[in-house]
Image (tube, rainbow, N blue to C red):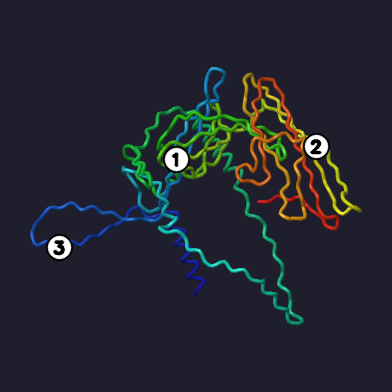
Amino acid sequence: MQRHLDRELARLDAERTANPPRKMEVRIDINSEAATTTTLLVSYTVRGARWSPMYDARLETGGRDRKPSIDLVRRAEIVQTTGEDWRDVQLAVSTVRTAKGGSAPELRPLIVRYPTPPRPLAEGAARAPISTFAPPPAAPRQEAMAQDELARKADRIVAEEQEATADTGGFQAVYRIPGRVSVSASEGAKNFRISSAVIAPDLVVRAAPAIDATAFLEASFRHGEDAPLLPGRVAIYRDGIYVGRGQMSMTSKDENVRLGFGTDDHVKITRSTTRQIEGSAGIINSAKTERREFKTSIRNGHDMPIRVVIEDQVPVSEIDEVKVELLPMTTAPTEKDVRNRRGVMAWNLEVAPSEAKEIRIAWRVRWPADKAVIFAPGQ
């Protein structure tokens, strides 16, 4: 009997999801001693409606006589499954994040204690089987390809879009979509243009050749609007060509924004190991050492000068007995511990057309001879 009820409830829930109700009824009881005329304004909250920030970032890279520019378009993606069609309505979206609640979370005491030893199994008791869990599957490739194709089609359609008006207060911004719009309860996502701005960015070619020698074009700018840039997907275009998708981070006014605009095949970067030595040091070989030296070459194939940022790293020790030394032949870095990443260094270079430059980095690690060390990624 219970299984039958469960199946019936599941069937009804599936029907309601597939074909939600299209109307909501509001009943108000009014009592008046005499005939009168009045206007009632009904305001209510519904579940199943949400909006997500989206962006288009269109970069014009410029040239010798033209400065680069970014056309940054904000969009609101609306999804509503309230069971009520929104027809010919005035629509507004707010930067208020209701899902965060109204108060900061309460911290609980953090206790340091010894772990409780496992209880011994009773004699003859079977051990619990060890399960392995596979990571969740990646998003279907077909879906990603379909999204990219839609973005390319949108790029070929030239249309003038109206923009929302913004009411910016001390703590939030409200964007009011112009005119009246309709959003059905069952049509899926629908997006509206909120605003746009033309921005003068700084361009740089960035690479981390210790992982990948590919050069990537990056644009950065300072966010100047009162309304923050909320986290969301970014459709990336470079000189009118769709190059992929990125992610916008939460950015408040006067904070810096970094957006990648794909690979730059005119900049060639190579990294090679010039020396790797393992040995011993000290009296009667009391310590072991490992020394590594690398050379990174950068060549500019553009017909204009470019700024290149190369990131590389030295090991970081968290053990007093393990010492890391940066050797003198290392090219002096422009910045250390880049973006609070320990051991990560950056070299900021101006490279002229057809010019080649080199960066050298060398380090040595020393540790007790009776120990073994490994080089592993850290936080």
Marks 3 and 1 sit apart, C-alpha to C-alpha, by 52 Å
Kindly give the residue lying farthest to the bottom in the view shown.
123
Q: Nearer the viewer, residue 193 or 66?
A: 66
Within 10 Å of disc 2 (Cα), the crowding (few <14, some 14-19, many 20+) is: few
Question: Which residue in the structure is indicated by mark 1?
Answer: 253
Q: Nearer the viewer, residue 143 or 204?
A: 204
Q: Secondary structure at mark 1?
A: loop
Kindly give the residue lying farthest to the top in the view shown.
65
Q: Quadrant of residue 277?
A: top right
Contact check, label 3 and label 2, Cβ < 8 Å: no
> Measuring 36% from the left and 46% from the top, which residue is drawn there?
170
Question: Which residue in the structure is indicated by mark 2?
Answer: 273
The x and y percentages for residue 31 are 15, 63
Q: Quadrant of residue 35?
A: bottom left
- Please, what is the three-letter code of the amino acid marked with disc 1? Lys
Marks 1 and 2 sit apart, C-alpha to C-alpha, by 43 Å
Q: Give whichever of discs 3 and 2 has the lower sequence position.
A: 3
| Above or below 120: residue 246 | above
The total of numbered circles placed on residues is 3
The x and y percentages for residue 12 are 44, 62
Question: Which residue in the structure is indicated by mark 3?
Answer: 31
- Please, what is the three-letter code of the amino acid marked with disc 3? Asn
